[in-house]
Amino acid sequence: MRPRDWFAVGLRLLGAYVFYRSITQWLSLLADSISQVPRSELAKEFEASTFRTGYIVVFAVGYLVLSYVFVFGAERITQLAFNERAASDAD
């Protein structure tokens, strides 16, 4: 495999990791909404002094969008990074 291919694979793996982070954020919100875990424990998980629901929602949505971009946009990002033309422009 060429370095370009490894770069695309790395982007997709990074996207999978960011998706995992998004899921952990949503699960923390769920645990908070059904009061299963004390807020002080949730704050420790996010290395914060207090657990703020709006703050976590913003990050969860952001992680979800970023994972989508990394997984489904890896080919386009790779083309930009390696200064290649799109396949339709090469013809």
Image: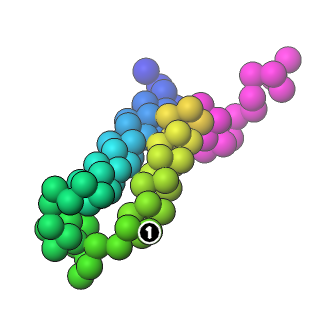
Determine whether the residue tagged by mark 1 lies in a helix, strand or loop.
Answer: helix
Relative to 81, say whether 46 is above or below: below
Instruction: Examine the structure image and report whether residue 15 is included in the region drawn in magenta.
Output: no
- Residue 55 image point, x, y percent: 42, 70
Picture mark count: 1
Foreground: 62 or 10? 62
State the residue at coordinates (35%, 50%): 26
Q: Is residue 41 left or right of residue 58?
A: left
State the residue at coordinates (28%, 73%): 51
Visible in this render: residue 46?
Answer: yes
Relative to 90, say whether 39 is above or below: below
Which part of the image, by quadrant, shows the C terminus?
top right
State the residue at coordinates (43%, 40%): 15
Quadrant in the rendering for residue 59: bottom left
Instruction: Examine the structure image and report whether residue 88 is included in the region drawn in magenta.
Output: yes
The range drawn in magenta is 74-91
Foreground: 73 or 58? 58
